Image: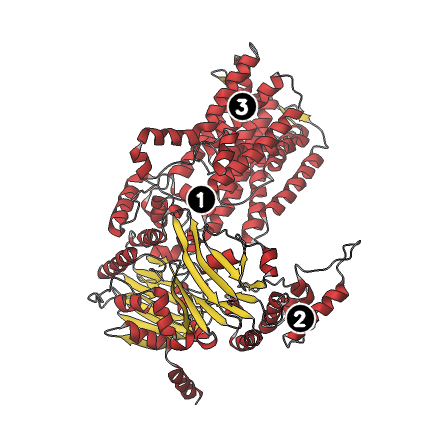
Amino acid sequence: MRRLEVAGLSKTFGSTRALRDVRIEIAPGELHGLVGQNGCGKSTLVKILTGVYTPDPGGSITVDGRPLGLPVRPAHQREAGVSVVHQNLGLVDDRTVWENVRLGRYRAGRLTRRIDRKVERAEAGRILSELGYELDVDLPTGRLSAQDRAAVAIARAVQDRRPGGGLVIFDESTRALGRSARARFFELVKQLTGEGTAVLMISHQLDEVVESTDRVTVLRDGAVVEGAVETKDVNEAELTRMMLGRHLVTHIRGTSHVRTETAASVRGLAADLVSGFDLEVRQGEIVGLTGLIGSGFVEAAEAVAGSRHATAGTLAVDGRELALADRRASTEAFVAAGVGFVPERRLEEGLAGEMSVTENLTLPRVRSRGGRLRTGSDWQARETAEMIDKLDIRPPDPRKPVGTLSGGNQQKVMLGKWLAGKPRLLVLHEPTQAVDVGARHDIIDVIREAASEGCGIVLASIDPVDLAALCDRVLVFRDGRVAEELSGELEPDTIAHAVFGDETRVQEKKTVENR
Amino acid sequence: MNVTHEEGLGVVGDAPDTSPRRSAANPVAGLFKQLGSRYAVVGVWIAMIVVYSIDEPGQFFTTSAFQTIFGSQYNLVFLTMALLCTIIVGEFVDLSVPSVFGFAATILTVLTVNHGWNVWEATVVAVIGAMLVGAVNGYLIVNLGVNTIVVTLGMSTLLLGVSLWMSDMNTISGLPSSFSKIATTELGGLPISFYYGVLIVGVFAYLLGCTPLGRHMRFVGANREVSRLAGIRVNRIRFGSFVAAGAFSGVGAAVSVATIGSFNPSSSATLLLPVFASVFLGTAIVEPGRFNPIGTLIGIYFLATGILGLELLNLQEWISNVFYGGVLVIAVTISTLLRKRTS
């Protein structure tokens, strides 16, 4: 008997299929991992399981052999023993522990409709102690430590399950937890699975997936590419490869275009966990930044581009010295100096979806190239036509709202937006994420071309294949610092190995450091 | 679902069809569809005029009715443009617009009539006063991050109170007749204030459509983070929009006072709903799904026509509440549906 059986589940939004014929099976007492890149359909799947989305007809969700009506209704979901712990744990910080644990289940007096505090407090205490937790249920959750907060969220999720039954879905729940809190969190999870409760763990942190899960399912572009692989048979590098897919187009490394002149140099950058980061990018050079999620490589790239607030550091481009730490500085100075940034989150940071392709493409230059009283339509039309042609943006309609384009074409518009201005430094964050093979090919070519024209490029990515195909050198981050620099003939495996290492090597390193 | 709703209202046909494949297959149908969605309200407007003309022979389709509709809406034109300033850069929504207008008009009349100031100097002070209020709104909302609705709702009530205090709760009249010329001089049967309105709408539309500043304003409204990362000074534009909104309200107040020759501070509150109804109705015209000045101007005259016709049918004053309120709800619904489709 399966605890959860999802079969033939699909979801279509307009013309895009977010999920295709997804099949997942989870056994009682199993800790099952679900991994995939952003945009692969993980969150769509969770939203179907929690009833936010209605799936396309034809799929089924079965819990303990009993089919769940679609769309899922919260009451049925709870009855079947399925509960979800969301990314931010879903706690209301200024309410007490018992209020949070019992939220949605309060029993009220028959006449007065008053919540019976005594019963609720006792109930919350009982649920927590079943998990082996003793907490003052009257404390506001905002004052608890990270691991206690996680425990409160878990207590809320598991209280309805029959002992040994039920399924708990953790949707990126460990994101907010520190390392030590995470250890305690997994103890709790193991305790649940030990009793027979099944757990579906959705996570970006491949290390914890490999360490803790029994089996893992990999989603890519809305489809299951590897269903229920025994976790002991895979490592993080292999999981990464499955998530990213075997690229049909293997990119042969292009010739290097590194010149002797410096394009940009970063000095003493500090942002979040990153500190003392120096970087010299030469014209035509492509420098890769990589590491595990949370190692600081993303933060470093964003701070260099002026998108993330830094606490210290300078960026010198084109003879100008820009303070990275200046709170009030807009990115105006960065743009003027020729720094472009292609962010990972397209429609949050990269493009305004309701505006047209032309308007998005030309945005950084409407003031410098247009007159004060007139944007001027000729140069805009020319620039847009040039970029549509160069990047093969489809459909080639300059007036189409960018939000209606596919992900790959949006990515191309973002690149074109900066490339049209001939940048001196271009910072790219996962430029080929969730784009199809053809678009990926175009994007890689265009990045190379920009380098050949003398642009310095910083590429922040977890994709070893992209990094190997594009970079002249790769900096591997660990705990906010550059731990290793790779250069010369780069192979995806070498990069993956440097990022993930293997257990023994990492431990050896640690003991060396400790001395 | 959406389609039937919208067609049921008879206001919007379809979203603009920009898909090249379809319009290539049938260019004529594509053009009609586009025109249909852009100018459906204009069609309803014409239909309304025809119905009223048949229903009220000799009353509706007359020069005086025409003059009433086009000559009396100058207040709304200025105030809707003031509201557009901030709503286009994504501030939802400035409730203080009519009160700023009333505040400026009160300053102008009180200084001139009660204190014997030169009317032109008083006008300048009034407009500056309105811009200062805009700056205070802007500072609280943009720099300190206080919620727009709360700030402007409070400011609105505060200013209404201050205006009533300054005027001692009286209607103040007795402005020099030379002043009224700036608004009431007739040109082609309509007061010059009508042309002021058309002019500022035209300038505003040009600014938004054709200048870098306008493009930046649109992007700030569409996505602040994207704008910031493209080097736009987002906060400066947001702050500037509040000050510009104050300026529009202030100038509108001067035109209004010049037209009527007096001002009653308690009258400004009744403008709130027509302003909102017009601006939201404007999102269904010319540029469907977007706040835009020309659509708003058409919306104003659409509403004025509807009200006048209903009044000529001998319906009492309550009808304007029903009409403006109803149109506001319908217009917001349509604009929400249109936005959903484009994004």
Residue at position x 39%, y 74% in the image: A236
Q: Under tag 1, what secondary structure?
A: helix
Q: Under tag 2, what secondary structure?
A: helix
- Camera-side residue of A39 and B175: A39
Tag nearer the camera, 3 or 2? 2
Query: Does the image show residue B124?
Result: no
Circle 2: residue type: Ile
Residue at position x 54%, y 37% in the image: B332
Q: Which residue is mark 2?
A: A127
Instruction: Tell me: residue B65, above or below residue B27.
Output: above
**Residue B198 horizontal/vertical position (percent):** 47, 27
Res. A223 mark: none
**Residue A30 horizontal/vertical position (percent):** 50, 72
Res. B217 mark: 1
Tag nearer the camera, 2 or 1? 2
**Is the residue marked by circle 3 packed among few (<14), some (14-19), or many (20+) residues within 10 Å?**
many
Left or right of B307? Residue B39 is left
Of mark 1 and mark 3, the one earlier in the sequence is: 3
Residue at position x 63%, y 62% in the image: A92
Identify the image quadrant of the C terminus of chain A: bottom left
Protein chain holding label 3: B
Residue at position x 38%, y 76% in the image: A233
Circle 1: residue type: Met
Residue that lies at the very extreme toward the bottom in this rendered image? A515
Q: Which residue is mark 3?
A: B183
Residue that lies at the very extreme toward the right in this rendered image? A111
Q: Are marks 3 and 2 in contact (CB under 8 Å)?
A: no
Kindly report the distance in space between the C-alpha atoms of the residues bearing marks 2 and 1: 53 Å
Circle 3: residue type: Ala
Left or right of A458? Residue A90 is right
Instruction: Tell me: residue A190, above or below residue B42.
Output: below
Query: Does the image show residue B149?
Result: yes
